[in-house]
Image (cartoon, rainbow, N blue to C red):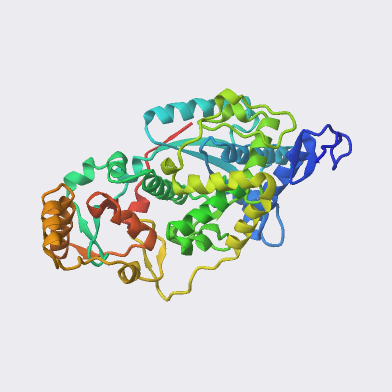
Amino acid sequence: MVVQDVCKRCRQGQVSVLSRKEPFCNDCFSKFVSAKQRKQMMCEPYCQDVFKVLYQDKVRSEAESVEQNAHSKVLVPLSFGSSSVVLLDILNDTLTEQKETQRGKTGFHIDVLVCGRDQDDIVRYREMADRLLSERYASNREKIKFHFLSVESFYKDCGGELDTILVDSADFSSRSIVENGELNREFGVEDLLKQCPDRSSRQDLLTILSSRLIKKFAYQNKHKIILWGHSMTKLADETISLVVKGRGSQIASMLSIDECDPLFDNSFKNLYPLQDVLLSEIDAYCYIKHLDPFMIDYIPQDTLLVEKQRNPELVSAPRSVKNLTLNEIARKYFDDVEADYSNVISTVVRTALKLGEPETPKPERCSICRANVHMDPSEYLQTITVSENHPIETTEESALYDKWNESQFSNQKIENTTLRDSIPQKAVSTSLCYGCLINVNRMKGRKLTWPQHSKSELETILDAFEL
């Protein structure tokens, strides 16, 4: 396809981006991406009341409108990848426009939450946040606050006892044992990750606990909306990954904007303002708006730019498929098809948005991810799994069994037998969804240490730092 020199929309600007087979200049492409985000921010009356500058009308008095504008707070989880940075930058532009057109008034405040693995991460993130505030958001500094949270808060501020969740190797039933106070004080995220057999399970648990911390922060600080910086590409790979992980029933609740989050007293909604924008479009927006210097551990792609800008020497080497997580494998697929078949990505997301959660009367909650459990996964696993050995019938088989019994692999059998014998004595039944059951079943010793979920946990104040 021959790229024309003049933007198709304004008929004036020089073409710089080719997206969805349409040529854009810088200004028109910026408006194209920004308009898609703002459309989602105004998608329903609840969101409009949060983002718009409210005035006295038939519904509210002048004092009520002033108070509502002052207390409309939104939370933006920031990873310093392209999507979350672009989301925050467009929100800043929205605040600036409101000040210019509404006589200095704004309709909302922004709290930015950054989660770090360790103190080194926190230091790096604070330095970049300082740069953003001073170089790009200085005019709205009083409206944008940065908060920094360590993932270790997941265990330190859990507000309750820890459970050791176990899976029986024979019938896949799940039980939990309340741990003693000494383990409660010492156990941390690094100990959790050591229980995981591979990167996929580690990433799965980190995603669950990070999401839990972010939502708990929103609950404690009375935010009305969490603005997740997921692109259409991210939502597509998340959808496929959930299906592969056995969490397909969670897709509808993850993408739902019709209801507030039921796990947190319906106190806020989850919104994906960039759900109509491809990741490659977000990355192109980064280069156009000169946001690429504010990325951490991410290099935006320049596939849509007419003039390529990223340094080829900075592009990371491809990783072996066997070392990729399920999400990374799905993302690799969508990256490969996006150039010629971007409609595949939009079809996946549109289909996901039409899904509904299975109707189950009073479903139990998974002890780990807190998703609704609509059927007992252990019953299904029993129907497709052979857990008993075939009896020894010949002398040759007997000799081979003795040889195996003397090897190190027999330790697994002894461990499973010991675990199965000990579970009924001191454990109580607990509910797990299929995805978490499979995860725990692959852990060392088929067990996982996880905080109990209770009302007191939500009320325990997270140890957060503010900038």
- Give the camera-side residue of 412 and 80: 412
Q: Is residue 18 visible?
A: yes
Left or right: residue 152 compared with residue 95: left
Residue shown at 48%/62% (left/top)? 248
Q: Is residue 53 visible?
A: no
Seen as rendered, the residue at the extreme bottom is 361
Above or below, 97 against 379 in this view is: above
Left or right: residue 365 compared with residue 111: left
Residue shown at 63%/30% (left/top)? 291
Could you say where residue 43 lies in the image, as x and y percent from the top left?
A: 67, 57
Could you say where residue 334 lies in the image, as x and y percent from the top left?
A: 59, 48
User: On the image, which quarter does residue 48 sit in?
Assistant: bottom right
Residue shown at 54%/51% (left/top)? 237
Above or below, 263 against 116 in this view is: below
Could you say where residue 372 lies in the image, as x and y percent from the top left?
A: 41, 65
Q: Quadrant of the N terminus?
A: top right
Q: How many marks?
A: 0
